Amino acid sequence: MIAVGGAGGPGRVRVHPAQSGAWAPAPRPAAGAGAQGWGKPQLTPLPELDKQARRLLVETDDAVRTSTEELGFATAQFGDEAVEPFRAAVAYAQTELTAAFKLRQQLDDAFPEDDATKRRMLDEIVGRAAPRRGAG
């Protein structure tokens, strides 16, 4: 027997005591599945994906510029050796950002891409410009 909610609170599942006796989190649909339940995730509409890519490019550009400035202060205070891992991370971010900007230039040139190509390029921009935490 399985009960949902009740004493365990909403979104909790209780398996019959003969099976477990412990409360466990209710299963969640896959990320991006939205109102479609457990089916195939819906694709982000191209205009929304384009807007997200533009926003991430600006935010990432600002973050890389700020980080580059901060590295100068950190180097002065802690020395080259102490900040080397951070210098490498900023250099990697700059490389990814440059590649993302090149893709954006291709999207904005006089030669329009078909929707599938545009989606692939926008997905790559988002992937390159999206913040990464604890990479490495």
Image (cartoon, rainbow, N blue to C red):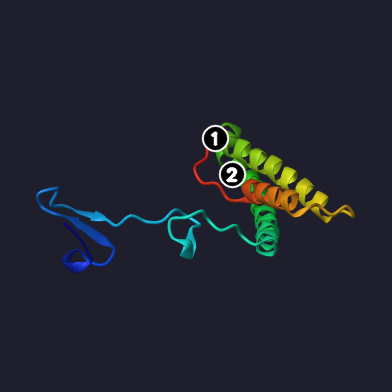
Residue 95 x/y as whole percent = 70, 40
Q: Residue at x 65, y 38 (%)?
A: 92
Give x and y (percent) for residue 90: 63, 42
Can you give x and y, in whole percent of width and height, for residue 67 in the image?
63, 49
User: Tag 2: residue type?
Assistant: Ala
**Badge number at residue 74:** 2
The secondary structure type at the circle numbered 2 is: helix
Relative to 128, 2 lies left or right: left
For disc 1, the marked residue is 82
Question: Which percent across, then down, holds residue 33?
Answer: 48, 58
Of the pair 65 and 36, the residue shown nearer to us: 36
Frontmost residue, 59 versus 2: 2
Q: Residue at x 48, y 62 (%)?
A: 36
Whether pointer 1 and pointer 2 mark residues with C-beta atoms closer than 8 Å, the reply is: yes
SS for dot 1: helix
How many angstroms separate mark 1 from mark 2 (CA)? 9 Å
Amino acid type indicated by mark 1: Ala
> Residue at 66% across / 59% down in the picture?
49
Whether 77 is drawn above or below 119: the answer is: above
